[in-house]
Image (cartoon, rainbow, N blue to C red):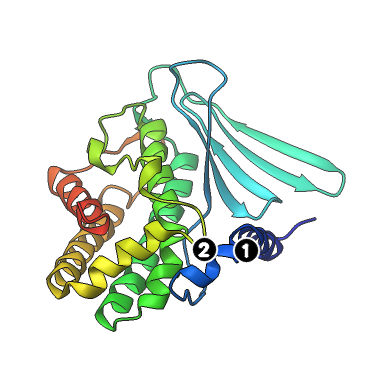
């Protein structure tokens, strides 16, 4: 069995192998334990359907699959793989099931913890840690957009600006795009202040969302972001990607 820790180590080694020849040309990254839950976006078998999202629970041994119709809990055990199906009732696709709410809350909580660390790193000028986070964070934000769309079966749940295009980032420890992004924060104090304010505002709405909309993990609980939440998220993305 491959543990979550072993998976992260293997991924790091793999990235280092591909990026080592170029590492000398980029700024120093200082690694730390990022609280983000791993999200993986997978194409659906049918065209025009929402993407399938894999949410890590315990490495490759236990994970959730979120789809537009039904959801799954996969557990890899010694005697094989156990698959639990969470069937969604017809006509209830715009509502959050208890299983979806539990997984969604885990993802949002991991985002909150990460943003709190990020804001402190910005405040203290820990650019090496900001550089390290950027190796993974844009991909998470991109996956987070698709998770929202799939869970609520609509592409209008979040502003279109929060659908991060591939060309804005690399999943790499030696990406010049990461260097350029953080360099602009580092050299422009006003840009850093605006990003910190946007991060705090987004954090406030994320925490409020969990307290209000997700306070009760009940079946057929309708989830909807307030307009202020959407605007706070849009501004955060705009500030983060220097747009």
Q: Residue at x 24, y 36 (%)?
A: 160
Q: Position of residue 130 (x, y in %)?
A: 38, 71
Q: Image check: 109 left or right of 228?
A: right
Q: Secondary structure at mark 1?
A: helix
Q: Are marks 1 and 2 in contact (CB under 8 Å)?
A: yes
Q: Quadrant of the N terminus?
A: bottom right
Nearer the observer: mark 1 or 2; the answer is 2
Residue under label 1, please give it. Answer: 12
Q: Position of residue 39 (x, y in %)?
A: 51, 47
Q: Mark number for residue 164?
A: none
Q: Image check: 62 left or right of 109?
A: right
Q: Residue at x 38, y 67 (%)?
A: 113
Work out whether residue 220 can be spotted: no
Work out whether residue 70 can be spotted: yes
Camera-nearest residue between 227 and 182: 182
Q: Image check: 215 left or right of 131?
A: left
Q: Residue at x 33, y 77 (%)?
A: 121
Quadrant in the picture for residue 58: bottom right
Q: Secondary structure at mark 2?
A: loop
Residue under label 2, please give it. Answer: 173
Q: Badge 1: how crowded within 10 Å, few (<14), some, or many (20+)?
A: few
Distance between the Cα atoms at labels 1 and 2?
9 Å
């Amino acid at each position: 069995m491959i543990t979550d820790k072993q998976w992260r180590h293997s991924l790091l080694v793999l990235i280092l192998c591909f990026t080592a020849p170029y590492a000398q040309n980029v700024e120093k990254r200082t690694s730390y334990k990022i609280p983000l839950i791993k999200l993986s976006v997978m194409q659906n078998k049918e065209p025009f359907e929402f993407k399938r999202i894999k949410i890590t629970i315990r490495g490759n041994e236990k994970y959730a699959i979120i789809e537009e119709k039904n959801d799954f809990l996969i557990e890899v055990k010694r005697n094989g793989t156990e698959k639990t199906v969470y069937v969604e009732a017809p006509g209830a696709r715009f509502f959050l099931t208890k299983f979806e709410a539990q997984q969604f809350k885990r993802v949002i909580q991991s985002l909150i913890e990460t943003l709190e660390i990020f804001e402190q790193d910005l405040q203290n000028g820990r650019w090496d840690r900001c550089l390290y986070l950027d190796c993974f964070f844009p991909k998470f934000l991109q996956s987070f957009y698709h998770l929202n769309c799939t869970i609520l079966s609509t592409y209008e749940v979040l502003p279109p600006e929060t659908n991060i295009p591939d060309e804005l980032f690399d999943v790499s420890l030696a990406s010049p795009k990461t260097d350029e992004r953080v360099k602009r924060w580092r050299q422009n104090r006003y840009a850093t202040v605006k990003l910190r304010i946007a991060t705090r505002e987004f954090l406030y709405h994320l925490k409020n969302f969990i307290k209000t909309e997700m306070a009760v993990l009940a079946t057929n609980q309708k989830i909807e972001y307030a307009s202020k939440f959407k605007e706070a998220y849009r501004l955060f993305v705009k500030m983060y990607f220097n747009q």
